[in-house]
Amino acid sequence: MVTTLSKSQIISLKPVRQDKDDKGQLKFLQRFFMSLPRDEFVFIGKKMDNGRMRQESFSGETGRKSVANGNFVLTGDDIYIAPNTMVSTKCRQKDNIGHLTAFFTDIDYSKTKEYKTKSPSQVADEVLNHCKKFHLPLPTMIISTGHGLHVWWMLNRPMQARFIHVWDAIQTCIYNEFKSFGADACAKDAARFLRVPGTMNVKDKNAPAEVAVIYMNAYRKAVDFDSMYRWAKKQHKANWLRRIRHICSNVSKDIPLYQLESLIAEDKIHIPAKEKFVPFILNEPTQNHAEPPLEKIIQKRVRRSESAEECSRRHQVKALSVNPMRVKDLETLVAIRQGEMTGKRELFLHHYRNTLARCGFNIREQAQKLTETNAIFTEPLPENEIKNILNQRKLYMARNETIIQDLDITATEQMMLLTIIGKDEKERRRVQKNKCGTSNDERVKGICAKILKQIALGKSTSEIADIIGCTTRTVRNYIHKYDLLGKGAVFCAAQMAEEGKSTPEHRDQNEIEDKAAEKAASTYANNSVNEMKRQVGDTAHPKPKRLTKREKNKLVSQILTLLQTQIPNFREKLKAVADTFYKEYEAALLIVDEQGKISYTKLFYELILRIAPGFFGRDLTSALAQNFAQALYAV
């Protein structure tokens, strides 16, 4: 059941007071609702005096609008919110989750011997230092609950519930990382309730405590799901190496992990069968995940002139995302070409399959769709090639330009498609929507030229407004904005004088002045509008070219050659820096084989490029790169 905010017993629809300390609740809610799906539901709860939890739910769009207007306040005792959104309002369970919006961990540091005497701010600093040491992305925010901490990593892009098995694996890695801080093993499920800042924690009636935000990441409002996955994957491998180092008796306990990994790769260390490395879970959606059906939300008619059917059709079109429209476009393209896709069949089915997978079709439905489409082709592909396309695990979102180039979609065909269109077709549709039938720049230039022409011919402001068909205020605005009475009039006078000298005397002077004024006004209007756009920065700047992998390797080799010529015994010193660097940060920079040959890791290349002057064009934000630069400069 959807709760109307005005009738809610938990939410107060009253203006947020800027002069009152809300313990960070407003900023928390702004970041929380920043990227939530609009058609899914948020659950909030309040623990009653009898111990039961009263739950209410509302749509993400409703919450976002209320927070944006500053009319969303949560006050009271024991108020909770669910980090992940639900598809329906029936229940707050794992099977009902629609999108995953955050990672989190509940740290009960008061139960540990090491941290129970410290303040929440001191424990938060320890958590941040731990994240930096083990290269975990810094959390979005840390909330003090009175007796513990809630650490949040909000996602910049919500992930579908089909990735929940990957989310669970990453969440388990986060729990294991903060187990020494007192992380709660029961508070890592996807349907968990967490406390809201600005409320009170009265779990202990004798010692009520305020829930407040004590750390807010000012540089990163949200983290990327893939970056959290990459960290968990590396940490999974590092934990296994530490376990092997502890188990194997013929291995030194101080050996760096990167050297241990190279010894294992060369089969120089015997690993028991029970301790064989198990790869981390793949970052792929579950194909057989059954998503609950979406609740139908009745849309109100906001246009009095439209019927109920037109309103329903308009909202259906508005709700379509890019991928469903791409599926329709690809099917339309086959129909336009009447199945003649020779030479483009593999690429077409590849893009078609990727789009179907992103729309939520499982592997059986994808195979059925591909088989039906292949049967429409004039020259169908063999079945084994369709199976090869279905066996491709890596999915990606292709750009429109890539699909147009791969399938050779012409401008005429683009006119019949919904979303697979190029820049020219997009501009054509935008201009077609315009009331004047021209772009905004052309419209402004045309009005400027008309006003300046009439000024050159000696017309007054009111006369110009009558001729053009606008108000005198509009004429005065254009005159002041583009300096038509100053530079414009001087330019037109000079151009008209030159045009009068170069024309024969027997021609009509009024006609000559009219054409000269029109030509001069058009030239000045074009130049002045373009200059105005250039001053405000409304021009298309070419994107800087990114270096290829080969160019990066060449640049790194040049930097190392320069350092080797300037620093005596550079390689020995660099090896010493790498060993010290690994002991402190467990980051492998060099790999030395049996013959003493040094090879560099990918991390080493990235750090060298980070410290290259002018390569990134910004200050070093990575603590790892800063420490490496200091160590290298010390050498």
Image (cartoon, rainbow, N blue to C red):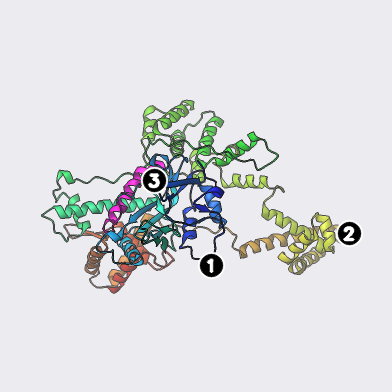
Residue 398: x %, y % from top left: 46, 44
From the image, state whether disc 3 or disc 2 is nearer to you.
3
Residues rendered magenta in the picture: 161-184
Q: Is residue 585 above or below residue 227?
A: below
Q: Is residue 438 above or below residue 495?
A: above
Q: Which mark is residue 191?
A: 3
Report the residue marked by disc 2: 506
Q: Residue at x 24, y 73 (%)?
A: 568
Task: Label 2, secondary structure: give it.
Answer: loop
Quick check: 141 left or right of 282? Answer: right
Residue 117: x %, y % from top left: 28, 66
Q: CA distance from mark 2 to mark 1?
A: 79 Å
Q: Residue at x 85, y 64 (%)?
A: 458
Mark positioned earlier in the residue sequence (1 or 3): 1
Quadrant housing residue 118: bottom left
Quadrant housing residue 149: bottom left
From the image, state whether disc 1 or disc 3 is nearer to you.
1
Mark positioned earlier in the residue sequence (2 or 1): 1
Task: Label 3, secondary structure: give it.
Answer: loop
Assess disc 2: are there few (<14), some (14-19) or many (≥20) residues with their C-alpha within 10 Å of its C-alpha.
few
Give the residue type at disc 3.
Ala
Q: For residue 79, say whether it is visible.
A: yes
Give the residue type at disc 2.
His
Report the residue marked by disc 1: 19
Q: Is residue 176 magenta?
A: yes
